[in-house]
Image (tube, rainbow, N blue to C red):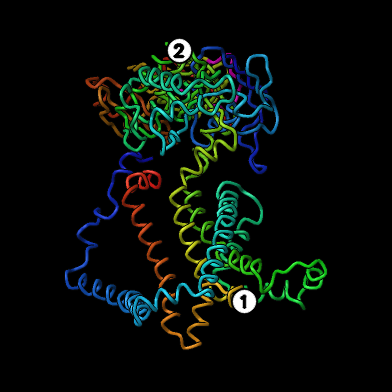
């Protein structure tokens, strides 16, 4: 099912949580809402689910306006952050709940509900645990039961709120791969919320980066990482270094020295230069480059991170060098970013 | 964001470190003080009640209990409890639901109001009803004109009992429901349940043990209430005397054996309540821990 969020604004007691957000989700897509806490990602998810009503704007399921529909009518599968499993019900009863509460002819027989529950348990690889209670399951198992329960109602859209938030790193990675497999097998349109960029970039077809109630950028993992469209996205996704610079005569300047980057398109004046610490080229002859004194040097796994002080203002930036690179021993290092981007100074 | 599993399996009382464990003599003193206190102030009176009740033999005991006035008192007490406890269950659940699950203006006021019966002397609550429904009261003339009798009759006793026992169910449920939050209900709704189904299949089972404790306490108090009922009942023998009032009358008539015989029934009720509670905890301990835990 296609989902279209059109100019949605949401206020809580006059405090805006979302400003004019629009988003098109394609049918069968696995999409991640990524952002720091307070960015409005969970609010957006709850709005799509119908757990909240938008202050303004509309939400379409396919061609149909779902904004005024209740959560029951929207037929969404929602997996809650802490799973919200019914603790007095067995695993099988939890999964069958959505079918049991149906009315009239749409309600399957008790036998059919049991059959569906054990089928879904097979799908989430928990066969044989029908009779257990949620308290007798591990965190990862509860997560899977919650997903099976949400899928039992054959939802139009599957919505997951921080699905791996309460799990430890090891289980997280396993479940991530597993969720991708399930998605590919069932083809549900799926939206999940996360604050973990690794999770979003690895798992999702497209990532929606959010900040302060706005969507900053929507794109594939490659697009988001390689061509961030705002200082926020540059800083939030992956490692980044930034320096205050000036644009004049189509050149980028630090203080009174051009650094060998031509910026004919950029507007004149103050700007901020962003680049990835690992995406730099070391130069010997500083004929237009960024040069700085080594302030600190740290070994991080397979690389060495060097902190440089640049110019009279002693601006600090980080770059990454191969561990055995001779430049790491020097007290002065000159480099030029290979890939970089300028944003006008705010 | 701790793993909930770790939380629910961690034993609560065995996790004390050596640093906060008292020394042996201190432990002994504390335990002796506690047991002595409970023994003198709780257990001893209970023993005296039963001792006095059977002081003149089993025959006198059964005779006291089969006396028509006594039987009428027992009957009235059961009737009052049978009316007021279910009503307070409904009121208590509604109030707890409203306070725990919604945000609205005047919530703090409502919470305070629920505690009012605990902070007001029962005699005062009885007097309030006299002022309201009495012959000289606010509604007295109107009630008389329409032939409705509230004061010195069963309706007045029921009203006073409801007032006094109102907090028990609500107070037991509010913290429980607040702690559990809306998550389970939201999950139920998202799975297609309507409000009533969410309440019946999810909310109620989640609070059933708390509710049961509340009902037990509410019932014990409804049967044992003296002050408020005493003011509104009028002490008409065989008609408006509940068991506690009957005990007092018998005692004032120097009929100690009969007074204690009836009192032993009330004390028995308290014991039954306790035993019931303990049995439930033993039988469903794991399930209670599961619904109250994580």
Question: Which numbered marker is on residue A306?
Answer: none
Indicate whether residue A271 is drawn in magenta: yes
Question: Which numbered marker is on residue B124?
Answer: 1
Question: From the viewer's perspective, is A184 left or right of B73?
Answer: left
Q: Quadrant of the N terminus of chain A?
A: top right
Q: Nearer the viewer, mark 1 or mark 2?
A: 1
The mark total stands at 2
State whether discs 1 and 2 lie on one chain.
no
Q: Which of the 4 image quadrants contains residue A321?
A: top left
Tag 2's secondary structure?
helix
- Nearest the viewer among B238 and B18 is B238
Q: Which residues are magenta?
A: A263-275
Relative height, residue B77 to residue B170 (above, below): below
Q: Which of the 4 image quadrants contains residue A229?
A: top right
- Nearest the viewer among B24 and A282 is B24
Q: Which of the 4 image quadrants contains residue A96?
A: top left
- Nearest the viewer among B263 and A158 is B263
Relative height, residue A306 to residue A225 (above, below): below
Tag 1's secondary structure?
helix
**Which residue is drawn at the image coordinates 39% and 14% (left, top)?**
A181
**Which residue is drawn at the image coordinates 52% and 26% (left, top)?**
A231
The residue identified by callout 2 is A186
Please provide percent x and percent y for residue B246.
52, 77
Q: Is residue A252 something one can see in this rendering?
A: no
Please provide percent x and percent y for residue A308.
36, 30
Please provide percent x and percent y for residue A226.
46, 15
Task: Read off the chain for label 1.
Answer: B
Indicate whether residue A87 is drawn in magenta: no
**Which residue is drawn at the image coordinates 27% and 23% (left, top)?**
A303
> Few, some or many C-alpha atoms within 10 Å of disc 2 (few <14, some 14-19, many ≥20)?
few
């Amino acid at each position: 099912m296609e989902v279209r969020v059109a100019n949605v604004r949401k206020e809580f007691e006059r405090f805006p949580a979302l400003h004019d957000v629009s988003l098109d989700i394609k049918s069968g897509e696995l999409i991640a809402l990524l952002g720091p806490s307070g960015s409005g990602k969970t609010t957006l998810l709850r709005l799509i689910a119908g757990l909240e009503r938008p202050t303004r704007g509309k939400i379409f399921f396919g061609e149909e306006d779902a904004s005024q529909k209740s959560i029951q009518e929207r037929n969404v599968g929602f997996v809650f952050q802490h799973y919200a499993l019914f603790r007095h019900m067995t695993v099988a009863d939890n999964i069958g709940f959505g079918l049991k509460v149906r009315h009239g002819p749409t309600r399957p027989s008790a036998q059919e509900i049991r059959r569906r529950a054990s089928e879904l348990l097979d799908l989430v690889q928990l066969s044989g645990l029908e009779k257990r209670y949620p308290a007798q399951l591990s965190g990862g198992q509860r997560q899977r039961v919650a997903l099976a329960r949400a899928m039992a109602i054959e939802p139009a859209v599957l919505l997951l709120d921080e699905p791996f938030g309460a799990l430890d790193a090891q289980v997280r990675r396993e479940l991530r791969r597993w969720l991708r497999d399930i998605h590919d097998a069932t083809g549900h349109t799926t939206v999940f919320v996360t604050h973990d960029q690794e999770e979003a970039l690895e798992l999702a077809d497209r990532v929606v980066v959010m900040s302060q109630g706005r969507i900053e950028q929507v794109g594939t993992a490659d697009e988001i990482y390689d061509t961030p469209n705002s200082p926020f996205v540059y800083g939030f996704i992956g490692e980044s270094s930034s320096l205050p610079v000036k644009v004049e005569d189509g050149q980028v300047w630090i203080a009174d020295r051009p650094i060998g980057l031509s910026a004919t398109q950029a507007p004149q004046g103050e700007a901020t230069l962003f680049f990835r610490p690992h995406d730099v080229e070391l130069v010997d002859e500083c004929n237009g480059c960024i040069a700085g004194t080594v302030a600190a040097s740290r070994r991080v796994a397979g690389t060495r991170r060097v902190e440089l002080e640049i110019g009279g203002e002693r601006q600090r930036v980080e770059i990454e060098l191969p561990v055995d690179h001779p430049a790491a021993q020097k007290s002065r290092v000159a480099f030029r970013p290979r890939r970089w981007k300028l944003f006008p100074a705010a | 964001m701790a793993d909930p599993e770790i939380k629910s399996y961690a034993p609560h009382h065995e996790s004390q470190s050596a640093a906060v464990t008292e020394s042996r003599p201190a432990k002994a003193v504390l335990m002796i003080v506690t047991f002595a206190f409970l023994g003198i102030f709780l257990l001893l009176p209970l023993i005296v009640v039963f001792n006095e009740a059977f002081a003149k033999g089993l025959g006198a005991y059964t005779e006291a209990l089969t006396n028509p006035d006594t039987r009428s008192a027992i009957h009235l007490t059961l009737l009052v409890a049978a009316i007021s406890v279910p009503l307070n269950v409904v009121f208590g659940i509604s109030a707890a639901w409203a306070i725990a699950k919604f945000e609205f203006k005047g919530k703090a006021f409502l919470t305070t109001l629920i505690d009012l019966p605990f902070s007001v002397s029962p005699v005062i609550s009885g007097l309030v009803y006299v002022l309201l429904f009495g012959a000289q009261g606010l509604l007295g003339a109107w009630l008389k004109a329409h032939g409705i009798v509230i004061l010195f009759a069963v309706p007045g006793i029921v009203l006073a009992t409801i007032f006094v026992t109102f907090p028990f169910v609500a107070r037991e449920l509010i913290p429980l429901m607040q702690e559990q939050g809306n998550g389970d209900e939201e999950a139920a709704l998202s799975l297609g349940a309507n409000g009533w189904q969410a309440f019946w299949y999810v909310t109620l089972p989640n609070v059933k043990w708390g509710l049961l404790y509340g009902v037990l306490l509410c019932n014990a108090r409804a049967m044992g209430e003296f002050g408020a009922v005493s003011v509104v009942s009028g002490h008409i023998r065989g008609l408006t005397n509940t068991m506690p009032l009957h005990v007092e009358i018998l005692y004032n008539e120097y009929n100690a054996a009969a007074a204690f015989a009836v009192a032993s029934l009330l004390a028995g009720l308290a014991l039954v309540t306790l035993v019931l509670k303990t049995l439930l905890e033993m039988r469903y301990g794991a399930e209670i821990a599961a619904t109250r835990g994580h």
